[in-house]
Image: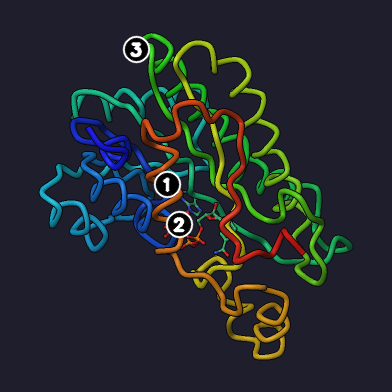
């Protein structure tokens, strides 16, 4: 056994939300590349993305989920469906989420509540559903996708609901990590910086904003979804067995400034 074997995920099953695009697709493909079968949890058909896993010789299934409907029962049903169809569940990546750009003067309370449901409450529901399964099993990994806006308010990004939700993602990650660390369940988070995905499309299309953000990134480039792959495999694998409640920034150095 070499240290690299610690990163293998053979025989394990991962569920990744929002796995049809961007960071979720990259994480799902990376976990499959390390040996895991993958449940693509998404509201849209992930047929295009699923080939990443099947090309690795892994099993891949689609389990539909609309985050707006992710209440207690729906989250439990999603976890149950993954276990029924793939035989077990070892890893949950809570990646799906949305963003709503508006000045706080126009970001109404109902907009704020909607973003909190999609980006935080649904994530908690899935943590809880998978966590109950993992506690019975005596093992499991949860990786929540946070943001640099889990630590900052953001200048000119105009996303009060999103910022609040992403701060909450780190809070939930730490709270659950503390409750479950002694019972075989690791709960951690990844905080991506500015990555070229649909989430940041309006920033990418604004040359002045794109350049201003680029200028602040020590690595000298925007990130891409593949930048998340190694962090996802690390936090899903035995290589991070003693890592609990951590938030791993994958941000080109953004938060270090
Ligand atoms: N890109 C960045 O710079 C960045 C930085 C920090 C954090 N993040 C976080 O990374 C995660 C993934 O985002 P991304 O950048 O990869 O963008 P993306 O390509 O837009 O991915 C977002 C995913 O969430 C899904 N989703 C959105 N609303 C949903 C809903 N109501 N119900 C079910 N699924 C829904 C999307 O499904 P559809 O394809 O059907 O819309 C998509 O699969 C998000 O949590 C985001 O906040 C991104």
**Residue sitting at 65 percent across and 83 percent down?**
210
Q: Compared to 240, does 96 lie above or below?
A: below
**Residue sitting at 65 percent across and 80 percent down?**
214
**Residue sitting at 55 percent across and 35 percent down?**
188
Disc with the residue nearer the chain's start (2 vs 3): 3
Q: Pinpoint residue 31: horizontal percent, then vertical percent.
A: 30, 46
Contact? badges 2 and 3 (CB < 8 Å): no
Q: Is residue 52 left or right of residue 116?
A: left
Q: Compared to 216, does 30 lie above or below?
A: above
The local secondary structure at tag 1 comes to helix
The local secondary structure at tag 2 comes to helix
Location of mark 2 (residue): 228
Location of mark 1 (residue): 232
Contact? badges 1 and 2 (CB < 8 Å): yes
Q: Which mark is residue 137?
A: 3
Q: Is residue 253 left or right of residue 62?
A: right
Q: Pinpoint residue 29: horizontal percent, then vertical percent.
A: 29, 54
Q: Is residue 81 left or right of residue 218?
A: left
């Amino acid at each position: 056994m070499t240290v690299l074997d610690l990163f293998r995920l053979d025989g394990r099953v991962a569920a990744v939300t929002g796995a049809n695009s961007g960071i979720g697709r990259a994480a799902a493909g990376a976990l499959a590349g390390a040996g895991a079968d993958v449940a693509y949890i998404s509201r849209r058909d992930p047929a295009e993305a699923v080939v990443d896993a099947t090309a690795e010789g892994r099993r891949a299934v689609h389990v539909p989920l609309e985050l707006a409907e992710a209440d207690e029962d729906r989250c439990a049903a999603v976890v149950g469906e993954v276990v029924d169809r793939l035989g077990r569940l070892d890893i949950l990546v809570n990646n799906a989420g949305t963003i709503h750009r508006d000045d706080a003067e126009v970001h109404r309370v109902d907009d704020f509540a909607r973003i909190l449901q999609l980006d935080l409450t649904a994530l908690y529901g899935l943590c809880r559903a998978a966590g109950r399964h993992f506690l019975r099993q005596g093992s499991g990994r949860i990786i929540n996708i946070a943001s640099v806006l889990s630590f900052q308010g953001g200048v000119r990004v105009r996303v009060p609901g999103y910022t609040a939700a992403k701060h909450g993602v780190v809070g939930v990650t730490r709270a659950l990590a503390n409750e479950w660390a002694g019972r075989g369940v690791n709960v951690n988070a990844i905080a991506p910086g500015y990555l070229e995905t649909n989430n940041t499309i309006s920033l990418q299309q604004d040359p002045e904003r794109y350049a201003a953000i680029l200028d602040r990134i020590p690595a000298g480039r925007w990130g891409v979804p593949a930048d998340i792959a190694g962090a996802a495999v690390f936090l899903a694998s035995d290589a991070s067995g003693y890592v609990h409640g951590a938030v791993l920034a994958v941000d080109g150095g953004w938060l270090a400034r």
